[in-house]
């Protein structure tokens, strides 16, 4: 059993931040309809909470990005494993991810989506490991900037485990992938 240590962000801190992000997004998109695109699997919890705090008309789609070879923290050789079903033409699209590391995942999806004629294309991530960034991507809405540590919970996994934790915790360095 992996030893988790240090709760980095508790339930309350996450809920407050999600509410703050939702208020800002609702304000920015007033009078418009928003299409949230949840980047699976990590962002499913964040997307569900964010969506319920938005006060504007919202629809949701899901996309899964995967990498060839073994799983690593930073995505190498990534590809879209499951694409959205909806036509993005003329839609206000907001990409939702749980955490940005190198930025490769978001860069790939942004590039593909920008070719599909959305009315607008923006990004939101709950967590940002800014110091790890290698791609030049624009994060429109950021929850928390966090240091370069491996975290789990609130949708994020370590070997598919711990997604169900209601808080975000760091993993013991000896156990990190
Ligand atoms: P990027 O493509 O390098 O930005 O990586 C983003 C993806 O890596 C996220 O969507 C997560 O799936 C995964 N990831 C990065 N850092 C962590 C972490 O600390 N815990 C869990 N997953 C992570
Ligand atoms: Mg993962």
Image: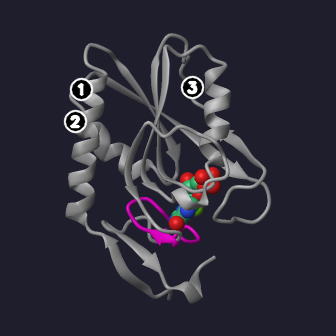
For the residues carrying marks 2 and 3, which lies nearer the camera in this image?
Answer: 2
Is 49 rendered above or below residue 60?
below
Where residue 111 sits: x, y (%)? 67, 30
State the SS at label 3. loop
Is 112 rendered above or below residue 65?
above
Residue interval drawn in magenta: 149-161
Q: Which residue is mark 1?
A: 27
Q: Which residue is mark 2?
A: 23
For the residues carrying marks 1 and 3, which lies nearer the camera in this image?
Answer: 1
Where residue 86 sits: x, y (%)? 53, 21
The residue lying at 33 percent from left, 76 percent from top is 7
Label ID, residue 94: none
Residue 82 seen: no
Does label 2 or label 3 sit earlier along the sequence?
2
> As rendered, which of 158 and 113 lies closer to the eye?
113
The residue lying at 79 percent from left, 61 percent from top is 69
Asked if marks 2 and 1 touch (Cβ < 8 Å), the reply is yes
State the SS at label 2. helix
Main secondary structure of the magenta stretch: loop
Callout 1 environment at 10 Å: few (<14), some (14 to 19), or many (20+)?
few
Q: Which residue is mark 3?
A: 85
Asked if marks 1 and 3 touch (Cβ < 8 Å), the reply is no
- Where residue 84 sits, quadrant-wise, is top right
Where residue 94 sits: x, y (%)? 45, 30
Q: Is residue 65 found left or right of 128 in the rendered image?
A: right
- Where residue 89 sits, quadrant-wise, is top right
The residue lying at 30 percent from left, 32 percent from top is 25
Cα separation between marks 2 and 3: 27 Å
């Amino acid at each position: 059993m992996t030893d988790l240590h240090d709760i980095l962000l508790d339930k309350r801190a996450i809920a407050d931040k999600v509410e703050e992000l939702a208020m800002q997004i609702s304000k920015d998109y007033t009078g418009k309809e928003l299409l949230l695109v949840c980047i699976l699997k990590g962002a499913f919890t964040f997307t569900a909470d964010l969506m319920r705090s938005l006060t504007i008309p919202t629809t949701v789609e899901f996309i899964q990005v995967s990498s060839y070879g073994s799983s690593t923290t930073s995505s190498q050789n990534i590809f879209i494993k499951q694409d959205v079903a909806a036509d993005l033409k003329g839609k206000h699209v907001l990409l939702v991810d749980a955490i940005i590391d190198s930025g490769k995942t978001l860069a790939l999806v942004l590039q593909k989506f920008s070719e599909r004629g959305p009315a607008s294309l923006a990004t939101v991530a709950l967590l940002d490991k800014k110091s790890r960034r290698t791609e030049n991507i624009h994060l429109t809405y950021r929850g928390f900037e966090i240091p370069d540590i491996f975290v789990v919970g609130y949708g994020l996994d370590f070997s598919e485990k711990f997604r169900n934790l209601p808080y975000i915790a760091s993993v013991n360095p000896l156990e990190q992938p």
